[in-house]
Every structure is written in structure tokens, then in C-alpha cells.
Amino acid sequence: MNFLMVFLLGLVFIANGTIVAETVFADHLPGSMLTEAECADKMGRDCFCWELGMCEFTDDPLGVMLMPYDAIFGGLAIVLFWALVVGLLWLRTESPQLVGIVGIAMVSSYMAYIHSDPDISLSAEFETARIIGITLLVISFGIAFYQMITTRLLSGPQ
């Protein structure tokens, strides 16, 4: 009897949830979004693809996620995210070796991604970000190398 009551109550919640979800997410239903002309008329400029919900996320997920931030920070968004992740990792672990290795992996993978895709247009701000990224990469190598040397020297003979 209790199972039947839970089942029926669950059906009521699911039915009400779909009605609420339809009204909340109605702007994402087909045909409910603004057209490019309507958006340009309201904004007074050409709208970005993320404002229209028309970005090709599956083709370039990292690039699409960084588009709004790059518009605000002028190409330095990945540097800010790198600093945030590495800073939080340092605050949580206080391990220079782990932070150095993660920093090296993040910067190297992003720099390799940028060089491997010829369709990406590089802005002047990105050149500044690239210089900062290379500097951070060298610092990360230095921290990781220093940590490996000091850990080995202080560990003693085994």
C-alpha cells in the first residue's frame, strides 16, 4: 500500500514538474528564440551566437564556453581561469609539485590546442595571454623541478 502511494505521489510530482519546466524553459523551445534581426534591433548591434543560443557547442566546446568571457576580458579569460584553478588547488593541497604538474598540463594542453586549430583567429590580446601563459609554464616547470629535487634530497637514503 505504501509503495502504491509513493508511486502515485511521484507521478503527480513528475507531471507537475514537466509543466513547470515547460514554462521555465520556454525560451529554449524551437521557434521561441529571437531572430538575428530582432536581436540586432533590440540590442543596437549584431548579436553574438551565445546571445541567440546558436553556437555550435559540439564542434568546439572550449571555444564556445570561452566566447562570452573573451568578449569581457579581451582574450585573457583562459589566463584568469588558469590562475583560479591553480590558486584554488594550492590553497587546498599546499603541494608545489602537484600545483606545478597541473599548471604544466593545463597551459601545455591549451597552447597545443591553439596551435593545432588553424581556424582560430588570434587577437592582439591573445598574444599577451600567450606571453603570460609561457611565463606561467616556465614558472610551473621551475616549481615542479625544484620540488622534485628538494623532495629527493630531503628524503635521505633508502
Image (cartoon, rainbow, N blue to C red):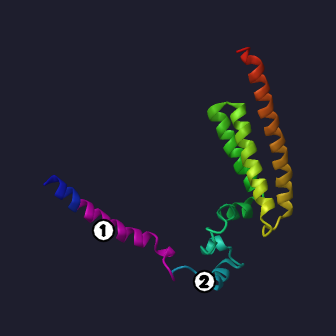
Image position, residue 153 (x, y; %): 78, 19
User: What range of the chain is rendered magenta?
Assistant: 9-31
Q: Quadrant of the N terminus?
A: bottom left
Whether residue 93 sits left or right of residue 20 in the image: it is right
Q: Is residue 141 left or right of residue 4?
A: right
Along the line of sight, the residue nearer the viewer: 14 or 138: 138
Locate the C terminus by quadrant: top right
C-alpha separation, residue under disc 2 versus residue under disc 1: 31 Å
Quadrant of res 18: bottom left
**Residue at left offset 35%, top offset 65%:** 17
Disc 2 residue type?
Thr
The residue shown at (31%, 64%) is: 14
Q: Which residue is mark 2?
A: 35
- The residue that mark 1 highlights is 15
Residue 16 x/y as whole percent: 31, 67
Q: Quadrant of residue 54?
A: bottom right
The residue carrying pointer 2 sits among few (fewer than 14), some (14 to 19) or many (20 or more) residues within 10 Å by Cα, namely few
**Image coordinates for residue 7, horizontal then vertical, percent:** 22, 59
Q: Which mark is residue 158?
A: none
Q: Amino acid at mark 1?
A: Ala
Residue extending furthest toward the bottom? 37
Q: Is residue 10 magenta?
A: yes
Around disc 1, counting alpha carbons within 10 Å, would you say few (fewer than 14), some (14 to 19), or many (20 or more)?
few
